Image (cartoon, rainbow, N blue to C red):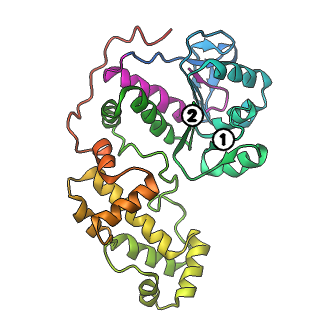
Amino acid sequence: MVVAYDGAELVDISCVTTGLDAANRAGARPPYRLRLVSLGGRSVRCDSGLELRAQGRLEDPVDDLDTLVVCGGLGHEGAADDSRLVDYVRRFATGARRVASVCTGATVLAAAGLLDGRPVTTHWEYARALAQRFPRIRVDATPIYILDGKVATSAGVTAALDLTLAFIEEDHGPELARRVALGMVTYLKRPGNQAQMSVFTTAPRPQDRLVRSVLDHVVANPGGDLRTAVLAATAGVSVRHLTRLFREQLGEPPGQLVRRVRLELAARMLAATALPLPQIAQACGFSSAETLRQAFVASYQITPSLFRATQSAAAKEDTFPRKSDTSDRFP
């Protein structure tokens, strides 16, 4: 059951519902029964201005609720201030096997007291406000999603798909989750603790021209000698000056950024190529396959071989099942 409200983000909702529907088409047994609810069963106006018709009333009892998902959106604060909505979410959470929020939907779960004492993530842009409003929860803006017992929280927008794929894998195994990911043409199913802010997508670009040139050099030459002293000498500045600029412009020292770039590139190569691990390690600047393995486990809590087995876009059986009868998917 997905809970929506005025000001909901449509992508937050559709990533969950389309992902679970795709799992049904891929053979999930038992199939997921999808239901979008709102207060009074009213249509909700999404952030984009589109109206979405609810399939049920939040006030109606559900005896066999499995998973409760609260979407995010610009209307999350208003939803969290709505005592009726929060009360119904709290009641349903008591009987649900699994409770989740997408993006700023965490604000609603927090208002219901469901996140007290838990590690929680949300969209990085709203993390500080969430932590300030609810000091009893432990907000971490870094991960894509966090699974903590029966409660799950995810980062913003398309991270809802990563969380949904994690649910599918938990319920039906990694092969079905992989087939859904391939069918939805997502690049790969990211591990939950992968950072929201990738070095390849973080915006804006560093304002300092020197930092930009060093960053471009790192990305273009991951297998080269990227020690801070070497980068500083190449840029014609002192190590201290380069480190200060990196901290000011990128929020981390050069060595830490180099390690992150190399790990992200290694993850991409593992998912998109059949190259052996020693070759990937060499290309990404690691001294050995074992060094890469240790760094990968430390950052992602998963071995490179397992990551490749479950994430590889080159895996077999990549056709998407045809849509079957959907009469059993809605209560």
* Residue under the image location 38 percent in, 12 percent down: 326
Q: Position of residue 266 (x, y in %)?
A: 33, 60
Dot 1 corresponds to which residue? 118
Q: Which residue is mark 2?
A: 149
Amino acid type indicated by mark 1: Arg
Residue at left offset 56%, top offset 15%: 65
For mark 2, give the secondary structure.
loop
Expressed as whole percent of the image width and height from the top left, the position of residue 117 reads 70, 41
**On the image, which quarter does residue 224 sit in?**
bottom left
Q: In the image, is residue 227 above or below residue 174?
A: below
Q: Is residue 120 above or below residue 176?
A: below
Looking at the rendered structure, the secondary structure element under dot 1 is loop
Q: Nearer the viewer, residue 288 or 216?
A: 288
Q: Is residue 173 left or right of residue 69?
A: left
For the magenta stretch, what is the residue range? 1-29
Q: Is 228 situated left or right of 79 in this image?
A: left
Pick the quarter of the image with the N terminus.
Answer: top right
At label 2, the amino acid type is Gly
